[in-house]
Image: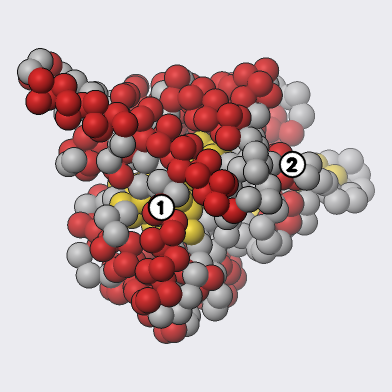
Amino acid sequence: MDAQKTNTLKAQFRNPPNCYRTLQIIHNFDSFGTDEATLRQRMEWLKATGIGGLVCNVSFKDYMRSEEQWRIFLTGLKVAEHLGLHLWLYDEEGYPSGAAGGLVLERNPDLEAVGLVRKVDADGKPHYEVQRMYEGTHCTENVYKKRRYVNLLSPQATRLFIEITHEAYARRVPNLGKRVHAIFTDEPSLMTTYIRPPAHALPALPWVEDMPAQFKRRKGYDLIPHLESLYTDTGNYWGIRCDFYEVVAQLVAERYLGQIQQWCRKHGIASSGHLLAEEKLLWHVMYYGDLFTCLRRMDIPGIDILSSDPLALAAGNGFLVPKLISSAAHIMGRTETMSETSDFAEQMSGKRATLAQMKATASLQYLLGINTITSYYPDLYGATHPNNTEQRRIDYAEYNAHVGRLSWLVSNRAMPPAETKATSRYVSWCNC
């Protein structure tokens, strides 16, 4: 390697280009300001913390309806581009994604999540009913907001979500596919699992009107005569339950994630985001049927890491999650993976992660196959200097440089073109 190339590599390692750095999640440009000058001043400060890009959306205030918020968003987008920041979109007003801030069900209440429940007649015979799912589920037990949710098994629900959300961005952002790299969907899930079961809650199974027909087409036998095996240990219940949740996973993958992926690819954008509760295999079944089946319909498979205590991650279930995602990417021939990372768990206990913990958490994830971090570390960042704003900015800049170096090293860009066969979408997107 000649001296010029060596010097270039050393310079990029010391100061990684933006395309390798952290993507900061910013939900409300209006919290920065409403005019271009104020937005620029605020984003210049944010860029000075060492971020490489944004995951952003039109403000949650009067979501998708306010022309003023659309104006602020488009102005913020223009400023971010002028500053050389890379852009992703976030597809929801909060989470779980799919409701379009409640607009989907406002237009069609019949698209609400439902479950099949088992009831017993007076004579002791079971029968099965479809009911709407809300109390005690992720609808009411997520941290963001209690809100009725759509049925992920319904293709009509996702079509309407895309119409309200994705199509709005495509109409309002010229050359969307050239300006936005990926769209982030956040924690879509089936609402047939109770997180805090209300009194007299009945066990529920994921359901959609054409489930019997879909099951027969995919598995070759009728589901209805075997419904009791889904609730009690009757007949070949092991096999029937496996078949049932395999069909559930296929429908979630095709009808929610698949429709989003198709729309994104049509517009030259990658689909990304993460599912709910990736930490345990049982939760995969409960919330979407099967993790790998669903991840096949994400161009950039992702996770969330809600703790920045690396010792706790290494000792707990979270340690496995980055490896699950990188394994899925490897199997599918994908080269980008994403982690939405924060110190949420520490904040819930009244603490904040230190700079050392944040860097170690990033290193642990990159060791296990993550190569993009979308950051939910809030403003201001870190806990090492709680009363010193400038020092906390310096700390976050050090964290973002650390993430950038990790991304730069694992992307194969640390080797000159003649010495690598890497042709990843990530490398081509960076173009730096």
Residue 167 screen position, x and y as percent? 33, 68
On the picture, is 58 further left or further right than 4? Answer: right
Q: Which residue is mark 1?
A: 48
Task: Give the image quarter of residue 61.
Answer: bottom right
Tag 2: Cα neighbours inside 10 Å, few (<14), some, or many (≥20)?
few
Residue 88 screen position, x and y as percent? 36, 53
Q: Which residue is mark 2?
A: 351
Residue at 21 percent across and 26 percent down: it is 9
Tag 1: Cα neighbours inside 10 Å, few (<14), some, or many (≥20)?
some
Tell me the SS state at disc 1: helix
Q: Quadrant of the N terminus?
A: top left
Relative to 223, residue 318 above or below: above
Relative to 425, residue 411 above or below: above
Residue at 68 percent across and 47 percent down: it is 386
Relative to 22, residue 100 above or below: below
Depth check: give the residue in front, 110 or 269: 269
Per the model, the C-alpha gap separating discs 1 and 2 is: 25 Å
Depth check: give the residue in front, 357 or 194: 357
Residue at 68 percent across and 24 percent down: it is 312
Task: Give the image quarter of residue 105.
Answer: bottom right
On the picture, is 167 further left or further right than 316? Answer: left
Depth check: give the residue in front, 228 or 246: 246
Tell me the SS state at disc 2: loop
The answer to which of marks 1 and 2 sits earlier in the sequence is: 1
On the picture, is 405 further left or further right than 413? Answer: right
Residue at 44 percent across and 56 percent down: it is 46
Q: Amino acid at mark 2?
A: Lys
1 vs 2, front mark: 1
* Residue 153 visible in the picture: no
